[in-house]
Image: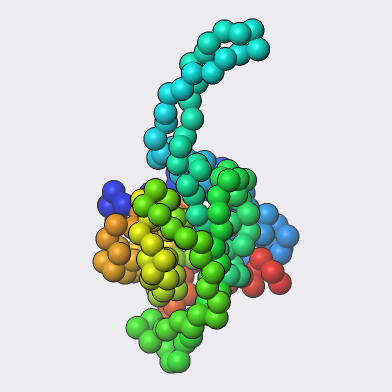
Amino acid sequence: MIDQRVKVIDHPLAKVILTQLRDKNTKQIGFRKGLVKLGRLIGYELIKTMELEEIEVETPLLVKAKGYRIPDLNHIIIINVLRAATPLVEGLLKALPDAKQGIVAIKRIEEKPGIENITVQKFYVKIPSISNEDIVIVADPMLATGSTISAVIAEVLNVGKPKRLIVVSVIATEYGIRKILNNYPSTEIITVAIDPELNDHGYIIPGLGDAGDRAFG
């Protein structure tokens, strides 16, 4: 898939960590720490897309020196899609420590096999006020069918229209990406890998299993 709205992180360390996450022998603590590490890496990659502003500072020797700042870092809102995204968000916050946070607790409902039959149920939504200066990051390790992320984006846009809306995942599928971009064309997507398949139950193949279960036991 070639789309300028989709960025796949090509950092060698991200590839190594993802391999560890895919491994069925990686235990709970290792899995959770891996998500944190990837969150930090993704955060640094995201910062590269922000505008760098030149400023001037005075050094302790009372000499003027050229410097830089990134204004957008003061306008970040991260939406934590509970529960699986919590370690990923922890990592994002290491790179984006001034970010505000929102929470959406949501559950996927599978009434019968077939990805077209998957729906979602929201339990709790708490999102800060959003202005047109804000960058909103919706974090969820798995962008599978896109049903969960679509529901979260709808909640975000009910609160306000941000300057940028970015979905951050560890693994995505072309099916899920198409669904998000078709429904919300201004959305950007950052992921570490795009896997080729979804099974009839909406799980990513080869994937890494249920991220929430593996991170929290």
Task: Identify the coloring.
Answer: rainbow
Question: Which residue is located at x 41 percent, y 74 percent?
Answer: 151
Residue 41's x, y, as percent? Answer: 55, 44
Q: Is residue 37 above or below residue 65?
A: below
Q: Give the image quarter of residue 116.
A: bottom left
Which residue is nearer to you in this view: 209 or 206?
A: 209
Question: Which residue is located at x 50 percent, y 54 percent?
Answer: 77
Name the image quarter holding the C terminus: bottom right
Res. 209 visible in picture: no
Question: Which residue is located at x 42 percent, y 88 percent?
Answer: 113
Residue 210's x, y, as percent? Answer: 58, 72
Q: Give the image quarter of residue 82.
A: bottom right
Q: Is residue 94 above or below residue 175?
A: above
Residue 97's x, y, as percent? Answer: 60, 45
Question: Which residue is located at x 64 percent, y 7 percent?
Answer: 61
Q: Residue furthest bottom?
A: 112
Which residue is nearer to you in this view: 194 or 140?
A: 140
Q: Is residue 117 left or right of residue 57?
A: left
Name the image quarter holding the N terminus: bottom left
Res. 216 visible in picture: yes
Which residue is nearer to you in this view: 203 or 78?
A: 78
Q: Is residue 7 left or right of residue 207?
A: left
Residue 189's x, y, as percent? Answer: 39, 55
